[in-house]
Amino acid sequence: MGKKIVMSGMRPTGSCHIGHWEGALKNWVELQEKYQCYYSIVDWHALTTEYQDSKYIKPNIRELLLDWLSVGVNPEKSVVYLQSSIKEITELFLIFSMITPLGWLERVPTFKEQKIQLKDRDLNTFGFLGYPLLQTIDIIIVRGNIVPVGEDQVFHLELAREIVRKFNNFYGNYFDEPMGFLTPIPKLPGIDGRKMSKSYNNAIYISDTTETIEKKIKPMITDTRRKRRNDPGVPEDCPVFALHKSFSSKHEMKEISDACRKAAIGCIDCKKILIKNINDFLEPFRERRKRYEKLNVMDILEKGNEKARETAKRTLEEVRELVKI
Ligand code: TRP
Ligand code: SF4
């Protein structure tokens, strides 16, 4: 038995923020040490919801790739590739579409939820319904066993297992049922205290510069009790403190919280500590990004495509034989 295979993907719909690091990338980087990993930029999945305005997908591919590389996804260890460059995925998707019951796809909760949430787009399409099947194919075409994703993907993974089971029943036990490696969705606050999200415009990005971090943190609203420097505050009611929880040590937090309650620290100084800690955290990412920006990162992706394609070809040949087509 060879090494277990890890497979995961992200849609190229924008830059990665700290939530992506906490919820996924951190695990991806760690898993590289123990497993053969396949990490895919899933641009076809982006197209399922962005097809009406698809010009943003392509520039986001390079951005996403740079984000991954900068946090330590290592193309020497892992296969990093672009979904749409692996045409074998489409053929396996077609073959599997024959055995996937419509009802299984229709009952996926994200299918109904997204259609309601993204009211401005018409998601009554074959492609959108097939989203979780395409995801299944992503995983199994490289013979993935372990799928590190956020908790929100649990239904997609359950479906993947069911589809694999069905294939194995018809054509002989060929695919392993992939297992989720689920991470709780981090309840990371953004700079306005609400959940960190691109759509709220409150995110701290992996690619933010020192200046950007300063610009984002300095004007943050603090506990409204602290109108003047010597008014005491309640850190639990302050979005700055909420961010300290992610970036500052326990010891620092205790000091800040005690000082805030006694008005022994001003909000400006408190923010300065936060700015420093965020920048210390991001600095290694920035260093790595600088190194990769000097290279042609699209060449790195092309090398990954070749490796992924080789694996995908092998799977597809064997599946064709099993299906007798
Ligand atoms: N659906 C996943 C998400 O929204 C993205 C994805 C596509 C994926 N294909 C995948 C994740 C394969 C893991 C494995 O996050
Ligand atoms: Fe918030 Fe810090 Fe000001 Fe207290 S001192 S209100 S924690 S910014």
Image (cartoon, grey):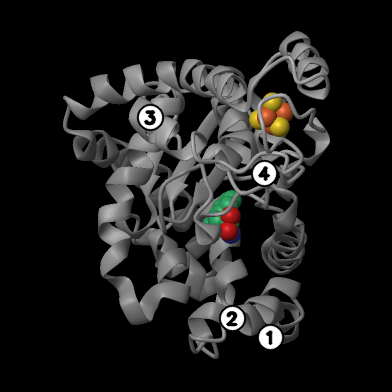
Reading the image, the residue beneath label 3 is: 69
Reading the image, the residue beneath label 2 is: 129
Occupied quadrant, residue 5: top right
* Ligand 2: image quarter: top right
Residue nearest the viewer, comparing 209 with 65: 209
Q: What element carries label 2?
A: helix
* Residue type, label 4: Pro
* Residue type, label 1: Leu
Reading the image, the residue beneath label 1 is: 102
How far, Cα to Cα, is label 2 from label 4?
32 Å
In the image, is 59 to the left or to the right of 29? left
Q: Which mark is residue 314?
A: none
The mark total stands at 4
Residue 237 on image: x %, y %: 79, 41
How far, Cα to Cα, is label 4 from label 1?
38 Å
Lower position in the chain sequence, tag 3 or tag 1: 3
